[in-house]
Image (cartoon, rainbow, N blue to C red):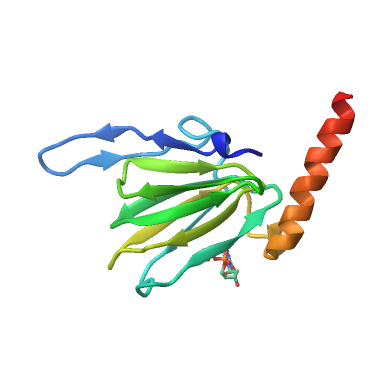
């Protein structure tokens, strides 16, 4: 997977003087069926979450409140995306290393995930992730030639 596959998805927003409403429909607004939802909250200032990549899992990361930055790394290059709007989600395909940093006080990060929790789906070692990325690139190159 490459960094360009990570994209901001603007979710429907029903603006209302009584307060705004946003909704997400599985496989309609995002490119996968939602099997799991989890959220990060009470993150102490200066802490980093993430620090891993997934073999198969796809995710949509939404800042429900406050702000934080997602540092993306496809093994070749890095990019930082700031999230601070409840109607915007950052789509992450599989094989994307991510670090979540700069959480503002009181921020809440919600993640919609394409699979149930499975520790075997994680790369938690960066060198192992890089090896897998390079193997994938080499395999693709040999299948093209
Ligand atoms: P982890 O995915 O490393 O958190 P983050 O990427 O947000 O920093 O998960 C932290 C711990 O929580 C780890 O022990 C696995 C556990 N966990 C579950 O049991 N179920 C889940 O759905 C998730 C996301 C994590």
- Considering depth in this image, is 25 or 78 the residue closer to the camera? 78
- Assign ligand 1 to one image quadrant: bottom right
Q: Quadrant of residue 31?
A: top right
* Residue drawn at 24 percent across, 33 percent down: 14
* Residue drawn at 38 percent across, 67 percent down: 41
In the displayed structure image, the side of residue 90 where residue 19 appears, left or right: left
Which quadrant is home to the C terminus?
top right
* Residue drawn at 69 percent across, 47 percent down: 56
Farthest top residue in view: 145
Which quadrant is home to the N terminus?
top right
In the displayed structure image, the side of residue 83 where residue 4 appears, left or right: right
Total numbered circles: 0
Residue 34, relative to residue 117: is it above or below?
A: above
* x, y percent for residue 71: 49, 53
* x, y percent for residue 63: 36, 52
- Considering depth in this image, is 19 or 61 the residue closer to the camera? 61
* x, y percent for residue 125: 70, 65
Farthest front residue in view: 77
In the displayed structure image, the side of residue 119 where residue 100 appears, left or right: left
- Considering depth in this image, is 106 or 113 the residue closer to the camera? 106
Residue 101, relative to residue 85: is it above or below?
A: below
Q: Quadrant of residue 140?
A: top right
* Residue drawn at 89 percent across, 32 percent down: 142
* x, y percent for residue 32: 57, 37
Farthest left residue in view: 17
Farthest bottom residue in view: 44
Residue 68, relative to residue 32: is it above or below?
A: below
In the displayed structure image, the side of residue 125 where residue 108 appears, left or right: left
């Amino acid at each position: 997977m490459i960094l360009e596959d990570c994209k901001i998805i603007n979710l429907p927003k029903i603006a209302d003087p009584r307060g705004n409403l946003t909704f997400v429909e599985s496989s309609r607004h995002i490119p996968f069926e939602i099997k799991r939802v989890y959220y990060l909250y009470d993150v102490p200032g200066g802490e980093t979450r993430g620090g891993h990549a997934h073999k198969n899992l796809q995710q949509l990361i939404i800042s429900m409140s406050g702000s934080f930055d997602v540092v993306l790394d496809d093994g070749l290059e890095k990019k930082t995306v700031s999230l601070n709007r409840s109607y915007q989600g950052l789509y992450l395909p599989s094989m994307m290393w991510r670090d979540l940093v700069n959480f503002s006080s009181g921020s809440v990060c919600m993640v919609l995930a394409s699979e149930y929790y499975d520790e075997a789906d994680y790369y938690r070692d960066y060198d192992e992730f890089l090896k897998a990325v390079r193997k994938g690139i080499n395999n693709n190159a040999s299948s093209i030639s």
